[in-house]
Amino acid sequence: MISETKHTHTSSFRNTGEIRLTIFLLLPLVPFHFPRSDPIFLAYSRADIMAGRYVANLSVVSTPSQDLALTNLAYCSVGDVRRFTIPGLNLAFALVGESFVLSLRYPFSRSVFVTYLSSKTGHDAIRDGQIALNAIQRRQAKVSAGDSISVTSFVPPEKFNLAVLTLELEFVKKGNRNEDLDAVVLAQLIRKRFVDQVMTTGQRASFEFQGTNYIFTVNQALLEGQESATPLDRGLLTKETYIIFEATPNSGIKMVNQREAASSKLFKHKEFNLEKLGIGGLSSEFTDIFRRAFASRVFPPHVVNRLGIKHVKGILLYGPPGTGKTLMARQIGKLLNGKDPKIVNGPEVLSKFVGETEKNVRDLFADAETDQKTKGDQSELHVIIFDEIDAICKSRGSTRDGTGVHDSIVNQLLTKIDGVESLNNVLLIGMTNRKDLLDEALLRPGRLEVHIEINLPDENGRLQILQIHTNKMKENSFLAADVSLPELAARTKNYSGAELEGVVKSAVSYALNRQISMDDLTKQLDEESIKVTMEDFLNALHEIPPAFGASTDDLERCRLNGIVDCGERHKRIYERAMLLVEQVRVSKGSPLVTCLLEGPSGSGKSAMAATIGINSDFPYVKIISAETMIGLSEGSKCAQIVKVFEDAYRSQLSIIILDDIERLIEYVAIGPRFSNLISQTLLVLLKRVPPKGKNLLVIGTTSEVGFLESLGICDAFAVTYHVPKLRQADARKVLEQLNVFADHDIDAAAEAIDDLPIKKIYMLIEMAAQGSHAGGAEAIYAGEGKININRFFDILGDVVSLRV
C-alpha cells in the first residue's frame, strides 16, 4: 500500500554533477496556461499542495503493453493519481526518486495519466500502490520490477514551458543501417506524441517513426523567457517548443530538411560579459571577430545557402606580447557550444620522422571530417587554435634547412582549409607576434582571412583589466580604501594586460610581506589584516616597467652630469623642440614630426634629445644608438631599427631618438664608406606616416651634417637646429652653476674655455678636481673646496687636443 509523508523544504530542479551544453534562442514569451480541470479528481486543495510535498512509495511493475511503452508514460491506478493532482490544473506533477518528474493529466476516459519525466496514466491493469515503467524508464531510475520507488508531489515553477529542446537520435537496434530523417516531419511527430510531458536533460525515451523504433536523448532544454546564462535542465514540451535534432557519431542517421534548426546553438550563453570571462579592453576587437567570423554561423544553414556565402574559416590575432591574444582565443573556445578546442602550441606539431609532421596536421582535422560526413550542415563547430603560428607557417622558401618541412606544413594546411574537399565546420585561430613572417597564402580570403590586431589597451581598457584582477580583493575586503583604479589606469600608459596583471601581483606581494616576520616565520598570520594599499601599487609600478614604455635608464645615461643652463642659444633650441613635442601631442594634422639636432661633437645634442624625451611625458620613448648594435650585420641592424618604429606605431604618443646617425650608417671619412642599406632604411622610416591615431616625433643627432646632406637624410627632417659650442658668457654661466671655482677665478676660467663644447668642459673640470689639493674631488663637488685656477690652466695646456 501507499505510505505518505509530508515535507516542507523546496524541491530541487537540477541534476547535480552533470556537464551540459546550452543553446539560446530568442522567442516570444508564451504564458504557461493550464485549462480548468474536473474537480471530481481533486484529492487535495491547492493550498495544501503549495504548503508541502506528499510522498508515496510505489511498487514498480512493467508496462502492460508495447504500445504503452512507446508513449514515455508511467502508469498507475486512478486512485493513486488523485493524490498528486493540483486544483485548477489538468496536469499534476510528481518526482520519481530524486531525479525524474511525473506529470498527471485528466480526464482521460475513466483514468488519468502521469508522465515519467513526462506522464503517468491510470490503467485497469495497474493496482493501487503500483507504478508501471518501461525498460528505459527503469534503467534510468535504476530500479527493477518488484522494487519500491519513491514518488513525491511536485509544483511546477512559473515559466516552465520549453522554448528549445535538443534531441540526439539513435536506433533502438544497432546495426549497419543508414536512414535520412526529415527533421520537419519528425518534429511534428515529437510535439504531437509527447506534448505536455516534462523533458529533462539526460532523459531517454523511445518512439516509433515510419516503422522503425528510435531512442532520443535530451541534450539541451531551454525555457521560455530565460534570463540567466545557464538554463534550467527541465521543462514542459508544448506545441510551440522548438526542436533541434542531432545524430550520434557513426549512428547511420542523417537529418535532412532541418530548416528550422537555427545555429544559435553555436554559443553556450546568450549574452557575452567579457569582464566575467577575464577579458578587458578588447570590446571593439571582440565585436569585429563576432561580426566577421560568427554572425553567419548564428543563422540556419538554409539562410546561409540562400545568401550564397561561405563561413569564415580562420582568424589571425596578432600584436605585441602580453596583450591578450592567447586569452581571447581560449575564451572564444569556451564560448562556443561545440567540441573542445584543439590547441597546437607552435612547434609541437613537428616530428623527426619523414611525413609524420604532415600526418599530425591532418589528424587535427580528422574529427571535423568525420563529423561533416555524418551530420553535414548540422555538424558541430570544431575549433583549432595555433599558438605562435609563425613558428610552423613561415613563408615558403624562406627556410634553408633542406627538409622543406615548413613548406609542407603550409601546403597541408591550405589543402585542409580551402582545398578541393574543404571543411565548412572548422574555425582556425592563429596567434603571432610576427605577422610579417607568415606565408601570404595563409592570409588570403578563405584561409586566415580575418586579421585582428590586439594592441596595447587604452586608459579605459586598462581600467577594465585592473578591475578584473582586483575584483576578488575588493569582494573580500583586501583592497584598501585609498586605492584609486582610475588613477592607476592613467599612470600605466603603454602597459599590456600581462604587465598590469604583474603589477597587481607585485602589489599583493608587498601587502603579504608586511604580515610576515622574518625573525619568526612560524608566527601566526593575521589574514583579516591584509590590505593592499595605493602605496603598494605605486611600488609595483616602479618594479615592473612597461616593455613599450620610455627607456628611462638609457635616456639618463645620455645626461650623466645632469642638465645645466648653457645660455640663451641652447635654451631657445630646447624651447623650440618642446613646441614640436606639444604639436605631436595635440595636432591631428601632423602625425609625424621630425627634428635634427646637429653640431660639433660634445656640444650636448644627445643630452638635449634625452631631456626632451624625458620631459615630454610620452608613454613610449626609445633611443636608437650604434652602441646597442655592435657586431650586428647590416640586415640585423635594419631589422632592429624597424622593430623600434613598429613598436612606436602601437603607442598613441611616441618619441624615437636616432643618436649619432653617422655612426648608425657606419660612416667613415676615408673612402668614404657607409651602409647604403641602413641609410635607405632610415630615409623610408623618416617619411613613413604612422597609423591613424598614432603620433610620432623623431629626433636625430649628428656631428657630420655635411655628409648627411650629401645623402639626402637632412632633407628628410622637417626641422634642423644647430647646437653650438659655448661662448665665454655661456661658459661663465655654466661655471657659476657648478660652483667649483672661486668667484675671482670664474672670469679667467671662462675666458680660457671659450668656444669649447660642454662635454669637454665637463671633462676638464673632472680632471682638474682630481688629486689631494682642496680636499679632493668630493670636497670640491660638495662646495667645501675650489679648483686652483693655475692647476686648471696646466690641465688645459697639457690637453692640447681640447682646442678645436
Image: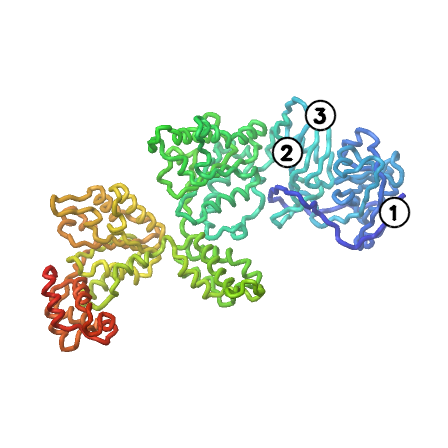
Picture residue at 62% right of the left edge, 47% below the top: 230
Question: Is tag 2's residue or tag 1's residue first in the polypeptide sequence?
Answer: 1
CA gap, disc 1 and disc 3: 39 Å
Label 1: which residue? Answer: 3
On the image, the x and y values in percent for residue 642 come to 29, 46
Mark 1 and mark 3 in contact? Answer it, CB < 8 Å: no
Q: Nearer the viewer, residue 644 or 6?
A: 644
Identify the residue at image location x=15%, y=52%: 704
Q: Is residue 64 left or right of residue 799?
A: right
In the image shown, does 622 or 592 lie closer to the viewer? 622
- Please say if the residues under marks 2 and 1 sit with CB atoms less than 8 Å apart: no
Vertical order, 665 against 61 (above or below): below
**Few, some or many C-alpha atoms within 10 Å of disc 2 (few <14, some 14-19, many ≥20)?**
many
User: In which quarter of the view is residue 784 placed?
Assistant: bottom left
Residue 173's label in the rendered image is: 3
Counting from the top left corner in percent of width and height, residue 417 is at 46, 31
| The quarter of the displayed image where residue 490 is located | bottom left
> Mark 1: which secondary structure?
loop
Can residue 462 be spotted in the picture?
yes
Image coordinates of residue 28 in percent, x first then y, are 63, 45
User: What amino acid does circle 2 point to?
Assistant: Phe
Q: Report the side of 266 relative to 419 (left or right).
A: right
Kindly report which numbered mark, 2 or 1, lies closer to the viewer in this rendering. 1
Residue 418 seen: no
111 left or right, relative to 215: right
Q: Which residue is mark 2?
A: 245
Residue at the far front in the pictured view: 772
**In the drawing, does residue 30 fall left or right of residue 668?**
right
Q: Please state the horizontal and vertical placement of residue 535, each as a whole percent of the image.
A: 45, 66
Which amino acid is tagged 3?
Lys
Foreground mark, 3 or 2?
3
Q: Secondary structure at mark 3?
A: loop
